[in-house]
Amino acid sequence: MELHRMVTQPQFTVFTSTPKRLRTRTIHGTEFRFAFVPVGRLFGVATHWITKQEAVRTSDLERTPIDGLRQPEYCGGIAEVAKGLWMRRDDLKTSRVIEYALRLRVGSVIRRLGYLLDLYRLAPELELERLRSVDLRKMKAHGLIERDGKRYAYRLTGKGTKVALTFVLFHQRLCGPLANSLFHHQPNSDARPNSKLEAAYHKADASIRNVIQLLEAA
């Protein structure tokens, strides 16, 4: 991100994507960390010339935020990716960023990118629909939603309604009382649970809320 002027502070650790599993190394005082990426996901790469004779392969401007959204712990969090997108909004080709996200086929990356592009109004509505349609296709494949006539809208099927009610009842009757009796309310996403059980609860709770929101949106 620093190479593409997407950060406001200097970075002292270099993260490198590689199809090989390598250990962290320190070379001339600089720490290099290696993130394993399968060969099929190594795309969006550009050549960056250091001197007239030496060059390195780096992620291009559009692939860089995708990597940040895939592994935000390597770049300071999603907030830093959001700053980078805004700083380079005039040069960023959002259609290519969306294409990379869809090609990567990682649900969390698609949802995070869609949220940021929509929040900052960085992409036209038609491009955002390409990201939203991924979750809709999955729900449609499972028979949870169906087209509402000829309109570009969806409604819950009978099966979808039952699934939605199941999650709501599960959340209200089991998760709610369990949380109130055993755990303190989680104040924010950065809070660290005191036990593995509490961490598992928060993870399940977040997943259920996400499914319910998708069903409501449909």
Image: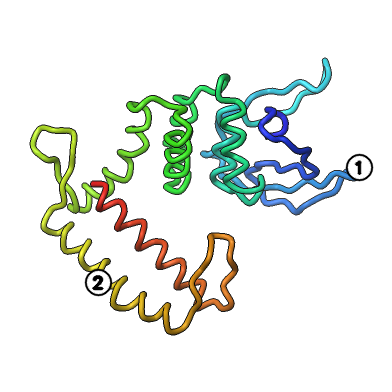
Name the residue located 33 percent from the left edge and 41 percent from the top edge. 134
Using the image as rendered, state which of residue 162 and residue 34 is in the foreground.
Answer: 162
User: In screen coordinates, is 159 left or right of 105?
Assistant: left
Q: Which residue is mark 2?
A: 169
Name the residue located 19 percent from the left edge and 53 percent from the top edge. 144
Name the quadrant containing residue 57. top right
Residue 59 placement (x, y as % from top left):
63, 31
Element type where label 2 sits in the image: helix
Residue 194 placement (x, y as % from top left):
59, 77
Name the residue located 18 percent from the left edge and 49 percent from the top edge. 145
**Label 1 to label 2: alpha-carbon separation:** 58 Å
Residue 29 placement (x, y as % from top left):
90, 45
Q: Is residue 5 above or below residue 18?
A: above
* Residues tagged 1 and 2 counted as in contact (Cβ below 8 A): no
Number of numbered callouts drawn: 2
Using the image as rendered, state which of residue 52 and residue 82 is in the foreground.
Answer: 82
Q: Is residue 19 above or below residue 6?
A: below
Q: In the displayed image of the protein, which residue is found farthest to the right?
A: 28
Q: Which residue is mark 1?
A: 28
User: In screen coordinates, is 29 left or right of 130?
Assistant: right
Name the quadrant containing residue 164. bottom left
Q: Is residue 202 above or below residue 109?
A: below
Tell me the colour scheme of the image: rainbow
Residue 115 placement (x, y as % from top left):
44, 41
Q: In the displayed image of the protein, which residue is found farthest to the left?
A: 149
